[in-house]
C-alpha cells in the first residue's frame, strides 16, 4: 500500500506544479481553455490522488475504480492547456 500512496503523492506533486503552469498561462493567455485546464487538474488531483490515498489508508479496493477517471482529467487538463497556448499564439 506504500507504493500506492507514493504514486498518489507523485501525481499530486506533478499536477500541483501543472496548476502553477496553468496560473502562469492564464495570466499570459486568458481564455476558456486555460481556465478549463486548471479545473481539470483540480478534479484530477481529487479523483486520482484522492482515491489512491483513500485506497492506501483504508484498503477499500473499489476506490481503485475511480482512479482512471482522475487520469482522464489529467490528460484533458494537459490537452486544454496546450490548446489554450496554441490558440493564443495564433
Image (spheres, helix red, strand yellow):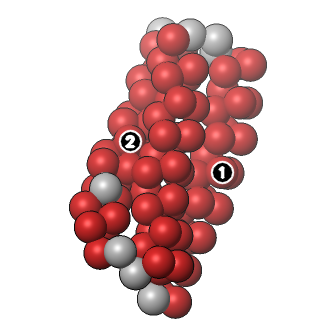
> Which residue occupies the foreground of this view, 46 or 24?
46
Give the percent coordinates (x, y) of residue 52: 45, 69
Could you classify mark 2 by the number of other residues whose Cα lies within 10 Å: few (under 14), some (14-19), or many (20 or more)?
many
> Which residue occupies the foreground of this view, 1 or 34?
1
- The structure residue drawn at horizontal position 52% and vertical position 79%, both measured from the top left corner, is 57
Q: Residue furthest bottom?
A: 2
Residue bearing the label numbered 1: 16
User: Could you say whether the residue bearing mark 2 is in a helix, strand or loop?
Assistant: helix
- Residue 64's image quarter? bottom left
* Residue 3 falls left or right of residue 30: left
Q: Is residue 85 visible?
A: no
Could you classify mark 1 by the number of other residues whose Cα lies within 10 Å: few (under 14), some (14-19), or many (20 or more)?
some
- The structure residue drawn at horizontal position 66% and vertical position 26%, both measured from the top left corner, is 25
Numbered tag placed on residue 73 in the rendering: 2
- The structure residue drawn at horizontal position 56% and vertical position 40%, both measured from the top left corner, is 42
Give the percent coordinates (x, y) of residue 68: 29, 56
Give the percent coordinates (x, y) of residue 43: 49, 40
How far apart in space, not on screen, are marks 2 and 1 (Cα)? 14 Å
> Which residue occupies the foreground of this view, 25 or 49?
49
Ranked by sequence position, the earlier of labels 2 and 1 is 1
- The structure residue drawn at horizontal position 29% and vertical position 75%, both measured from the top left corner, is 61
Amino acid at each position: 500500500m506504500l507504493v500506492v500512496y507514493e504514486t498518489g503523492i507523485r501525481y499530486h506533486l506533478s499536477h500541483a506544479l501543472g496548476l502553477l503552469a496553468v496560473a502562469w498561462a492564464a495570466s499570459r493567455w486568458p481564455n476558456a481553455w486555460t481556465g478549463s485546464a486548471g479545473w481539470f487538474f483540480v478534479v484530477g488531483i481529487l479523483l486520482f490522488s484522492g482515491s489512491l490515498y483513500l485506497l492506501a489508508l483504508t484498503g477499500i479496493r473499489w476506490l481503485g475504480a475511480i482512479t482512471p477517471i482522475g487520469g482522464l482529467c489529467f490528460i484533458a487538463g494537459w490537452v486544454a492547456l496546450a490548446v489554450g497556448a496554441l490558440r493564443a499564439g495564433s
